[in-house]
């Protein structure tokens, strides 16, 4: 299997991620697209910005959260007296995967 094949299958079935990437590229303006939901959160794919995490910070700011700091691949955000960590993972050279907690994704 080539390196491309390995990269495509690193998260299991690549179809949901590739469909989300297609929506990002051709859908018109979204900075992140959902591709799966888990019991803990919604998984998104995002284009890496000038700073890799720009799309995540923009999304969280829209939800009322302020970026505080980065710890490894986790981004720490604060809102009022709450703190949460958004986990990220590089998927390819141009895309990252982002796990947004359900409470944020559903606006609670």
Image (cartoon, rainbow, N blue to C red):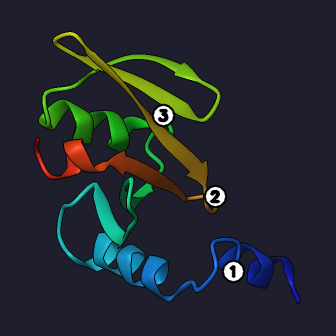
In this view, the residue farthest toward the front is 39
Q: Mark 2 = which residue?
A: 93
* Residue at figure coordinates x 20%, y 30% from the top left: 61
* Label 3: element kind: loop
Q: Earlier in the sequence, mark 3 or mark 2?
A: 3
* Residue at figure coordinates x 15%, y 52% from the top left: 106
Percent x, y for residue 80?
16, 12
Q: Which mark is residue 9?
A: 1
Q: Do the residues labelled 2 and 1 touch (CB within 8 Å)?
A: no
Q: Quadrant of residue 66?
A: top left
Q: Which of 38 and 86 is in front in this view?
A: 38
Q: Mark 3 = which residue?
A: 51
Q: Earlier in the sequence, mark 3 or mark 1?
A: 1
* Label 2: element kind: loop
Q: Residue 59 carries which label?
A: none
Q: Earlier in the sequence, mark 2 or mark 1?
A: 1
Percent x, y for residue 95?
52, 59
- Above or below for 100 versus 19: above
* Label 1: element kind: loop
Q: Which of 4 and 108 is in front in this view?
A: 108
Query: What is the C-alpha distance between the residues marked 2 and 1?
Result: 15 Å
Query: What is the C-alpha distance between the residues marked 3 and 1?
Result: 25 Å
- Above or below for 107 versus 16: above
Q: In which quarter of the image is residue 37?
A: bottom left
Q: Which of 82 and 6 is in front in this view?
A: 82
Q: Name the mark nearer the viewer: 3 or 1.
A: 1
Q: How crowded is mark 1: few (under 14 residues within 10 Å), some or many (20 or more)?
A: few
Q: Quadrant of the C terminus?
A: top left
């Amino acid at each position: 299997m080539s390196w491309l094949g390995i990269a495509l299958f690193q998260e299991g079935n690549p179809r949901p991620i590739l469909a989300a990437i297609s929506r990002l590229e051709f859908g018109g303006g979204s900075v992140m697209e959902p591709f799966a939901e888990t019991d803990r959160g919604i998984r998104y794919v995002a284009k890496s910005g000038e700073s890799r995490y720009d799309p995540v910070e923009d999304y969280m700011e829209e939800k009322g959260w302020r970026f505080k700091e980065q710890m490894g691949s986790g981004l720490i955000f604060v809102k009022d007296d709450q703190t949460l960590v958004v986990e990220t993972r590089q998927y390819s050279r141009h895309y990252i995967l982002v796990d947004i907690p359900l409470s944020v994704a559903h606006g609670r």
